[in-house]
Every structure is written in structure tokens, then in C-alpha cells.
Image: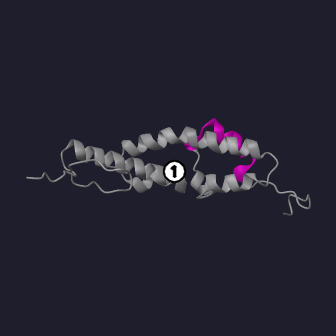
């Protein structure tokens, strides 16, 4: 396109610039990425195809998500009686998907341990009754 032919020079927005990425890698847990972009990771990956330091941008996105991942799962497992909207308010859409999947799994495991359901289910599927084959007489 235009950038490939050298007709235009595309610069990354501030949320993806080198300076912000440096702050982000210093402590990714304290930065509210949702304020920058609701789809921060997806937008960054698409933008990487057009900027000069694309490899550095992709590396930063991967490192950021991996560093935030542990904190997201920790919060999802240990927030059973808390306001989930407050906890997930600074997370991107991808991070919220991870958070709510972890929270649902933790809730189901808690119910299973208290004998409130018969079995655990795969993510996204409701717990079903046990499948026992009918025996022939």
C-alpha cells in the first residue's frame, strides 16, 4: 500500500510508541491499558505491520500480556465475593475474557467442592449430569 511504496511514513500512536512501551515493561500491572485502547493487543499487532520497529512492538505486546496474565488469573481465582466490574475495569477485552473464564472456573470448582454440582464442565459448557450407560438386563 502507501507505506510499502515509501509514499508515507506511519508513526505509532503514543500508546504504542517506544517511550510508552518502556514504561509499560517497567511495571505492566499498574497501567490501565483499557484507557489506551479497548483492544490494545489486537490493535498493536495490526499496527506492527506498518511501523519500522515492528519486532520490538510485537515483543513488547507479548511480554506485557505474559506479565499481566499471572495477576489476571490470580484476581480471577480470588475474587469470589467482590465487585467484578471494579476489578476488571482497567483490563482490555482480551484480558477480561481471560479474567471471566478464570472466575467462572474458580466458581464452578468451589461449587463442586461444596457438592452443589455433580461434575465439572469444560470452559464455556454447563455442567451436565453424569453420563452412565444403561445396562442391559
Q: Can residue 80 be seen?
A: no
- The quadrant holding residue 126 is bottom left
Q: Is residue 127 magenta?
A: no
Residue at left 86%, top 63%? 2
> Magenta segment range?
14-30
- Residue beneath label 1, please? 95
Q: Provide the major secondary structure of the magenta segment.
A: helix
- x%, y% of residue 51? 80, 52
Residue at left 45%, top 49%? 99
Q: Can residue 96 be seen?
A: yes
Q: Identify the colour scheme used.
A: one colour
Q: Residue furthest bottom?
A: 2
**Residue nearer the viewer, 26 or 38:** 38
Q: Secondary structure at mark 1?
A: helix
Q: Is residue 16 magenta?
A: yes
Residue at left 70%, top 39%? 22
Amino acid at each position: 500500500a502507501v507505506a510499502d511504496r515509501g509514499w508515507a511514513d506511519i508513526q505509532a500512536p503514543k500508546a504504542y510508541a517506544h517511550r510508552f512501551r518502556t514504561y509499560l515493561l517497567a511495571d505492566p500491572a499498574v497501567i490501565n491499558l483499557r484507557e489506551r485502547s479497548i483492544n490494545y493487543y489486537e490493535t498493536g499487532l495490526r499496527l506492527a505491520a506498518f511501523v519500522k520497529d515492528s519486532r520490538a512492538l510485537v515483543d513488547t505486546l507479548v511480554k506485557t500480556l505474559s506479565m499481566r496474565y499471572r495477576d489476571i488469573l490470580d484476581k480471577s481465582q480470588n475474587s469470589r465475593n467482590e465487585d467484578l466490574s471494579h476489578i476488571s475495569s482497567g483490563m482490555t477485552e482480551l484480558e477480561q475474557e481471560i479474567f471471566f473464564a478464570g472466575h467462572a472456573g474458580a466458581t464452578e470448582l468451589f461449587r463442586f467442592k461444596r457438592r452443589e454440582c455433580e461434575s465439572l464442565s469444560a470452559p464455556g459448557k454447563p455442567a451436565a449430569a453424569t453420563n452412565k450407560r444403561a445396562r442391559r438386563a
